């Protein structure tokens, strides 16, 4: 697995795993998973909602609300559902739900999604991808989503481009979108290559 190239851009690589994990994985073993998602970089236990503002060119153009919907059974795992509701000027309202499960080592897996134009579940012809490793390190890369049943096949690869004890920044290789996570809070800022930002307010 390669590290980052110049200007924070990752060099070409085949992102297949972190610390020996099989990513993506077709058959997550329920015996290897715990009931709650308490990874400090993606803490879903103990908090039920997050609110973000969307800005473009210094002007607020929308808002995002993220809410924990509760437990859900996915491939025999006790996953946590997280619903994201986005309202952006000119684009209307959209809603999706992602399902996360944490293994005993503290790695958080994306095991399913309900999207506007389709959905998928691990173990039903789709693979679980890694949402956040237990110990993220600069240069680590992994597959978060390998395929989604829409009109196009989707493959999302994340790479860590910045990290310190309190924050870590992930970049989507495909889009260049960067998301910064704060320990104990989760995602606090997303910067798209268009200049649009989505920032946590409460």
Image: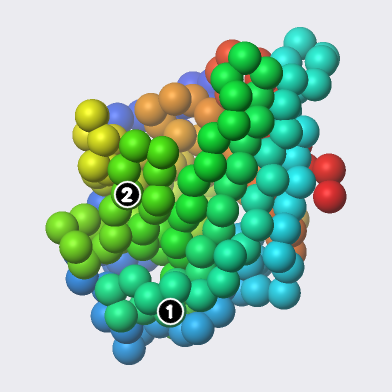
In this rendering, the answer to whether 186 lies above or below 135 is: above
Q: Residue furthest front?
A: 92
Residue lying at 62% horizontally and 63% vertically, measured from the top left? 68
The relative height of residue 142 versus residue 91 in the rendered view (above or below) is: below
Q: Position of residue 166 (x, y in %)?
A: 74, 55
Image quarter of residue 194: top right
Q: Residues within 10 Å of mark 2 (few under 14, many from 20)?
A: some
Residue 78 is marked as 1
Residue 23 position (above or below residue 61): below
Going 74% across and 20% down the picture, which residue do you hit?
61
Q: Nearer the viewer, mark 1 or mark 2?
A: 2
Label 2 sits on a secondary structure element that is strand
Q: Nearer the viewer, residue 103 or 97?
A: 97
Q: Is residue 182 left or right of residue 168?
A: right
Q: Is residue 142 above or below residue 78?
A: above
Q: Does residue 163 appear in this view?
A: no
Q: Is residue 47 left or right of residue 111?
A: right
Query: What x and y, as percent, mark residue 89?
Result: 67, 18
Q: Residue at x 59, y 31 (%)?
A: 93
How many marks on residues? 2
Mark 1 Cα shell of 10 Å, populated few (<14), some (14-19), many (≥20) = many
Identify the residue position indicated by label 2 in the image: 119
Q: CA distance from mark 1 to mark 2?
A: 18 Å
Dot 1 or dot 2: first in sequence order is 1
Pinpoint residue 9: horizontal percent, then vertical percent: 46, 26
Is 60 left or right of 48, judged from the image as shown? right
């Amino acid at each position: 697995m390669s590290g980052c190239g110049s200007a924070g851009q990752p060099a070409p690589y085949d992102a297949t795993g972190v610390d020996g994990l099989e990513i993506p994985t077709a058959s997550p073993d329920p015996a290897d998973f715990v009931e709650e998602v308490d990874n400090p970089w993606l803490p879903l236990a103990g908090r039920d909602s997050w609110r973000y503002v969307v800005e473009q060119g210094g002007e607020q153009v929308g808002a995002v609300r993220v809410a924990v919907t509760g437990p859900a059974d996915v491939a025999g795992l006790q996953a946590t559902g997280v619903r994201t509701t986005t309202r952006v000027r000119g684009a209307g309202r959209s809603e999706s739900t992602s399902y996360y499960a944490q293994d005993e080592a503290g790695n958080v897996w994306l095991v399913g999604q309900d999207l506007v134009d389709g959905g998928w579940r691990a173990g039903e012809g789709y693979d679980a991808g890694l949402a956040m490793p237990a110990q993220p390190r600069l240069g680590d890369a992994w597959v978060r989503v390998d395929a989604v049943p829409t009109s196009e096949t989707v493959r999302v690869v994340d790479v860590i481009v910045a990290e310190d004890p309190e924050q870590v920044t992930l970049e989507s290789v495909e889009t260049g979108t960067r998301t910064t996570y704060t320990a104990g809070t989760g995602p606090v800022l997303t910067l798209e290559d268009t200049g649009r930002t989505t920032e946590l307010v409460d």
